[in-house]
Amino acid sequence: MSLDDERFARMLHLASKTTPVNQAFSPPIVNTSVYALPGDPGGAYQYARWGNPTWTALEASLSALEEAETITFPSGMAAIAAIFTSVLKPGDRVLLPSDGYYTTRICADKYLAPIGVRVDTVATAQLGAHKLAGYRLVLIETPSNPALDLADIAANVERAHAVGALVAVDNTTMTPLGQRPLDLGADFVVSADTKALNGHSDVLFGHVSSRSDELIAGVRDWRRIVGSIPGPFEAWLVHRGLETLEVRFSRMCANALVLAQRLAGHRKVVGVRYPGLPSHPAHSLAQAQMASFGALIGLTLADKEAAERFIGACRFIRPATSFGGVHTSAERRARWGDQVAEGFIRLSVGCEPTEVLWREVERALNE
Ligand SMILES: *Cc1c(COP(=O)(O)O)cnc(C)c1O
């Protein structure tokens, strides 16, 4: 696989030949709660909790890229919750990654377990050895975050389907360009577009895609009924961000590979975790499953002081949580209680010129 994907070019040109003469190519931001609706109700836009032309434009692009019907949400968590609530019933069992996005587990413990859904967890690298019989839904997040462990999507989908379980993949870190869970058989893909997909660190957003009419209808109904709907301006911003995803993500991943390789040989570095390095325990799976190796690097320095000093000294690192933006950013994950060394840094590599970024990272490490 590679990032050189015709789907992206097709997405960019979805409306190139169908936009009426004298109409803007740029989609309008439609701020409304109501639509003209005389007589018997009908048509695409009846009430704005059900639909909005600015969402429709973005969803058409995301659907083209995912090759699957797509429903957008006001955050990544809203998108994950929509899968949970539309699929799971009391008595069902759900399997979550123990090393995936923390709030996903909190959401399940706080809102699913009390209504009789059994919530189990397993480490991403151990998923292949975990029995899947009895589960209604298996959620995979690969690479995991921040340890960047991998799970084999195709193999686990096959095992899950053999016992009647559905599989959802949280593809936030890789975006639809870097990894294609639906092509590998997953029933749902979910993404926090807050991260690399929008990429400009200026909006929270999410989407769910599925090639099953029934499953995506459940997600659409959930949004329409509970009103977990994106704002038109946020949808417009994400649409604008999405159009440069390929150039941004290519640069970020290329930068990350260069940095990971060079960091691994630096005397001040205790460890480097990156799926694109042969030293990664699942490097061959990464080569087969991912179109690129992503923009996140797990970097371990000697201790907390060394890590904080490095983040503070590097002029081209923003100290921030979250990741996937055009600006390189970093944080020590132990500050959130993650089970990692005190000197472990999650480095989210951005779009800075490659050699400029490396020289500054090297200078800050040596300082
Ligand atoms: C950030 C993130 C989420 C949640 O997204 P929000 O937009 O913050 O709600 C979910 N999954 C992963 C993997 C994330 O990184």
Image (cartoon, rainbow, N blue to C red):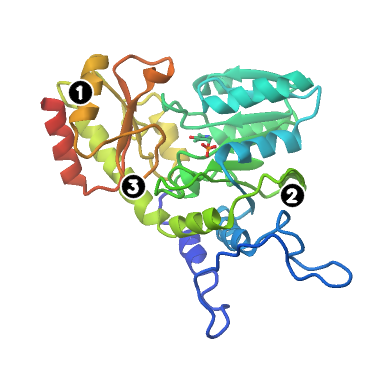
Residue highlighted by disc 1:
309
Looking at the rendered structure, the secondary structure element under dot 3 is: loop
- The x and y percentages for residue 252 are 32, 45
Residue 218 circle label: none
- Considering depth in this image, is 287 or 12 the residue closer to the camera? 12
Secondary structure category for the residue under label 1: helix
Question: Which amino acid does the dot numbered 2 rest on?
Answer: Arg
Residue located beneath label 3 in the image? 326
Per the model, the C-alpha gap separating discs 1 and 2 is 48 Å
Identify the amino acid type marked 1.
Arg
Task: Tell me residue 26's x, y (percent).
Answer: 49, 70
Q: Determine the CA span between mark 1 and mark 3.
A: 22 Å
Q: Residue 328 in the image: x percent, y percent?
A: 29, 40
Question: Circle 2 sits on which residue?
Answer: 224
Can you say which quadrant of the picture contains the C terminus?
top left
Residue 252's place in the image compared with 133, above or below, is below
The local crowd at label 3, few if under 14, some if 14 to 19, many if 20 or more residues have their Cα within 10 Å, is many
- Residue 218 point in image, percent of width and height: 76, 44
Q: Amino acid at mark 3?
A: Val
